[in-house]
Amino acid sequence: MSREKGFAAETSAADWLATQGFEIVDRNFVEKIGELDIVARKDGVIHFVEVKSGASFDPIYQITPAKLRKVIATAHIWLQKHRVHSPFTIDALIARQDSFELIENITM
């Protein structure tokens, strides 16, 4: 997927999360080890949301153990840099054509 399509999917995902009561706190946070697509807050919990999309395959399969390790490490850096000490979760937001599926706490 091109970077433009990925950014468009992330923008749509952020808009959808906002309609679900999430406050978008940060987007495209980049560190040497990895990137966070969306950082959101809802009910006092920080959600690090990995956005995956695709039309000809199930995007969930793009979230590999290696990708999860990078997201987790980058989330810890984000928490330290922003001095946030609240509960957090690593989530996946799967975009399939015009629908979204939020899978919370994908590290369990």
Image: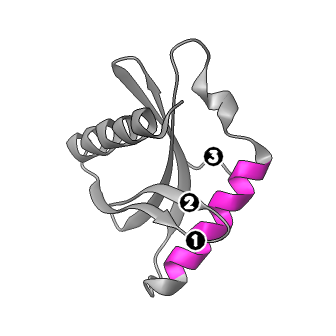
17 shown above or below 29: above
Q: Which residue is farthest top? A: 56
Label 1: how many residues lie within 10 Å, few (<14), some (14-19) or many (20+)? Answer: some
Percent x, y for residue 52?
A: 53, 35
Marks 1, 3: nearer the viewer? 1
Which residue lies at the image location 45% right of the left edge and 37% below the top edge?
A: 6
Q: Residue furthest left?
A: 19
Q: Which residue is mark 3?
A: 106
Q: Residue at x 65, y 63 (%)?
A: 72
Q: Earlier in the sequence, mark 1 or mark 3?
A: 1
- Type of the residue with mark 1: Glu
**How many discs mark residues in the rendered view?**
3
Q: Quadrant of the N terminus?
A: top right
In the rendered view, how is the structure colored?
Answer: one colour
Where does the magenta region start and end?
A: 66-79
**Left or right for 65, reference 10:** right
- Queried whether the magenta region covers residue 6, the answer comes back as no
Residue 24: image x %, image y %? 29, 58
Kind of residue indicated by mark 3: Ile
Quick one: 104 or 26, which is closer to the camera? 26
Q: Which residue was labeled with disc 2?
A: 35
Secondary structure under tag 3 reads loop
Q: Is residue 72 left or right of residue 103?
A: right
Label 1 to label 3: alpha-carbon separation: 21 Å
Residue 23: which quarter of the image?
A: bottom left
Residue 90 lies in what quarter of the image?
bottom right
Residue contact at pointers 1 and 2, CB within 8 angstroms:
yes
Q: CA distance from mark 3 to mark 2?
A: 17 Å
Q: Which residue is mark 1?
A: 31
User: What element does badge 1 sit on?
Assistant: loop
